[in-house]
Image (cartoon, rainbow, N blue to C red):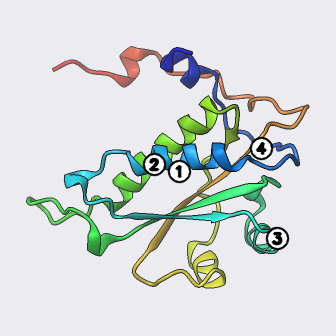
Amino acid sequence: MDLLQLMEERYFLRAYDARPVEEEKLQRVLEAGRIAPTAKNMQPWKVYVVEKEKDLALLRSLTPCAFDAPVVLMFCGIEAESAHSGFDGHSWDQMDTTIVMTHMMLEAQAQGLGTCIVGWFDSEAVQKAFQLPEEEHLWCLLPMGYPAADAKPGPQHDRRKEMSQLVTRL
């Protein structure tokens, strides 16, 4: 499949089938993140794979946005391990973590899996519940699994601004 077509067909999946994600597919998704580019290739990120039922139940108690997915990836950035701007000292850990997450999201789609980028959660509460290291900042969650039989894109999925509203050539 053409990459642009894959991107056009993917949507934020909010209804998952109970079928588990095969280990081979999960490993391909994780490898897509491992090879993702980061500033100065410093790789200032960590991903936690939540797949045990007790851990999924805990996460679901903290956010409604786990959507009963059989796997949820938790993406953390590590500022101390990140490249920083030489101009203002800005850390690139959030940007790098987002790039990694995007690579994983697209590989999941290529594997026939759906995902939903989630930012609707109390980062501190999730971090505390899962005893994540203090030096890691939890940026986003990525529920992942097979689409439920009745899954469909949200009503705003196909809405796009015109290119002229988004791009200015200088």
**Which mark is nearer the camera, 3 or 2?**
2
Label 1 – label 3 distance at C-alpha: 22 Å
Label 4 – label 3 distance at C-alpha: 17 Å
**Residue wearing tag 4:** 14
**Residue wearing tag 3:** 57
Is 160 or 142 nearer to us in this picture? 142
Residue 9 percent location from the top left of the image = 64, 22
**Which mark is nearer the camera, 2 or 4?**
2
The answer to whether 161 appears left or right of 38 in the picture is right
Kind of residue at disc 1: Leu
Kind of residue at disc 3: Ala
Residue visible at 26% across and 65% down in the picture: 82
Residue 63 percent location from the top left of the image = 73, 65
Pointer 4 or 3: first along the chain? 4
Residue visible at 41% across and 55% down in the picture: 97
Residue visible at 82% across and 70% down in the picture: 57
Residue 85 percent location from the top left of the image = 15, 59
Kind of residue at disc 2: Gly
Q: Are marks 2 and 1 in contact (CB under 8 Å)?
A: yes
**Which mark is nearer the camera, 1 or 3?**
1
**Residue wearing tag 2:** 33
Q: Is residue 148 above or below residue 40?
A: above
